[in-house]
Amino acid sequence: MRLTILISFLAASLAAAQERPNPGQVYQHAPLEVLLPDFSAEGLVLDIGGGGEGVIGQLKGKQVVAIDLSKRELEEAPGEPLLKVVMDARELKFLDGTFPTATVFFTFMYIDPGDHEKVLGEIYRVLKPGGRLLVWDATFPKKTDAKQFFIIYPLRVKLPKKDISTGYSVRIREGLDADHYTELAKRTGFQLSAQKEEKGWFALEFAKPK
C-alpha cells in the first residue's frame, strides 16, 4: 500500500483516541514478507485478534474460533472460521483446557505491553496440556527520530494458495521483540519449542507442558 493510504488508515484507527498523526510523525518500515505455510493442528484453533485480514481464518477455515475486541473487524474479516466472537483476550470466556492450539498473528503489537503477560496467562489457561501457542509479530526498531511516534509495516503474507497484501500501523513500542515474548511466556509456564527470526518480524512456538 502507498504511504499516504496507510497513514489515512492509521489516522482512522487512532481517531477514537484523538490521535491524528501527520506524515512527519510516522516511520515507514521496509516491507515485510511473511511466508505462512499450512501448519498441522488437530481440533480447534483459537485465534487471538482474528479480525481484520483474518489470516489464520483464511488458512485454517472451519478449525478456527476467531476472537477480537472489534465487532467491525470480525465482520469484515474474510475466510470462513467456525466462529467469530467479540471477546477481550485479557479475560477469555472459555473453560480451562479447551483448545489444543492457539495463534496470535501480528496482534500483540496492538495490545498494551503491560497486558501481554495477562494475555499469555489466559491463553495458557485455555490450552489443553501439551497444547501449542504460535505467535507471529513485528520486531520494533529503536527510534532514531524523536518526532516519530507511529510506525507502518507494509506486509505481504504468502499463504499456500494466495498472497495477502496489507499494512499494519501502530504506535512505536521500543523493546518488543522475540525475547520480550519468550521471557513472558516462560514466566507464564510455557516452554519454547521453536523460533524463527527474519528482517522485521519473528515467529515463535510455545508448548504447554503435559
Image: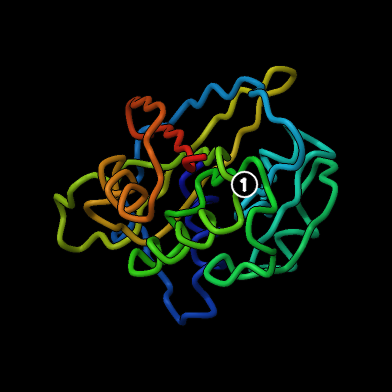
Identify which residue is drawn at 18% across, 48% down: 142
- Residue 200: horizontal and vertical position, in percent? 34, 34
Query: Which color mode does the image show?
Result: rainbow
Identify which residue is drawn at 38% across, 62% down: 117
Crowdedness near tag 1: few (<14), some (14–19) or many (≥20) residues, C-alpha within 10 Å: some
Identify residue for label 1.
128
Count of numbered tags? 1
Q: Nearer the viewer, residue 185 or 189?
A: 189
Please identify the quarter of the rendering in which residue 129 is found.
Answer: top right
Q: What amino acid is labelled 1 in the image? A: Lys
Q: Measured along the vertical axis of the image, is residue 26 above or below residue 92? A: above
Identify which residue is drawn at 75% across, 59% down: 74
Q: Nearer the viewer, residue 161 or 208?
A: 208
Name the residue furthest front. 210
**Would you say 129 lies left or right of 18 here?**
right
Please identify the quarter of the rendering in which residue 162 is found.
Answer: top right
Image quarter where the N terminus lies is: top right
Disc 1 element = strand
- Residue 133: horizontal and vertical position, in percent? 52, 41
Q: Measured along the vertical axis of the image, is residue 64 above or below residue 18? A: above
- Residue 101: horizontal and vertical position, in percent? 63, 40
- Residue 206: horizontal and vertical position, in percent? 45, 37
Q: Nearer the viewer, residue 114 or 14?
A: 114
